[in-house]
Amino acid sequence: MTNLDDYRIREQPYYKPVGSEVALFEAAYQARMPMMLKGPTGCGKTRFIEFMAWRLEKPLVTVACHEDMTASDLVGRFLLDANGTVWHDGPLSNAVRYGAICYLDEIVEARQDTNVSAQSISIIPPPTSRPRSSPMRPASPPAPRAPWSRSASARATCAATVWTKVPRPAC
């Protein structure tokens, strides 16, 4: 894959903001913080990501996670072809390489090694030194989180992932 033009959202998806989630996403995106969207089935997480990809004019790579997914399914693997062994990027690597938004849908369904790989690639240090302050402050003390969760104070800089908490829309 040489570019991700096929993954661009061409028409504006319908999305009606219910709070400050658009501004929070844009602030996290500008700060190169990963995002994690949490909410019940059908509350609009996927639609919100589609809207933000359209608004930011970024390709959107969506991966439907499942219990048999491995880290190499996300990152990539060596495969044999007529010329020998060749590396093939996975969807997460392609998103990082081409500056896309990678939406890992239902990541809680994926195996633990997959979650660790996704978390590891999202905390690549920035290429420049700049103040590392968070644009958001949690309203209350953070609740216990799963090992793959990233808090609002996380300093991840991979522009291709989107995992930071955004207020859950009222469903």
Image (tube, rainbow, N blue to C red):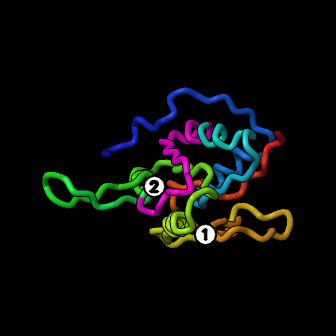
Identified by mark 2, the residue type is Leu
Q: What is the count of numbered marks?
A: 2
| Residue at position x 31%, y 45% in the image | 2
User: Distance between the Cα atoms at labels 1 and 2?
Assistant: 19 Å
Question: Image quadrant for the N terminus?
Answer: top left
**Residue annotated with mark 1:** 155
Residue 46, image x and y in percent?
64, 41
Residue at 59% over, 54% down: 162
Quadrant location, the C terminus: top right
Residues 134 and 75: in front is 75
| Percent x, y of residue 53 | 56, 41
Q: Nearer the viewer, residue 21 or 133?
A: 21
Asked whether 57 falls inside the magenta stretch, the response is yes
| Disc 2 packing (10 Å; few <14; some 14–19; many ≥20) | many
Which residue, given by chain and number where applicable, does mark 2 sit on?
Answer: 92
When the figure is inspected, residue 103 is found, relative to residue 10, above or below; the finding is below
Q: Which residues are magenta?
A: 51-72
Q: Position of residue 134 (x, y in %)?
A: 68, 66
Q: In this picture, is 136 found above or below 43? A: below
* Magenta stretch: includes residue 138: no
The tag on residue 49 is none
Tell me if I can see residue 159 in this picture. no
Label 1 Cα crowd, 10 Å radius (few <14 / some 14-19 / many 20+): many
- Give the residue at x 61% y 69%: 155
Helix, strand or loop at label 1? It is loop
**Is residue 79 in sight in this rendering?**
yes
Q: Mark 1 belongs to which amino acid?
A: Arg
- State the residue at coordinates (39%, 42%): 4
User: Which residue extends farthest right?
Assistant: 140
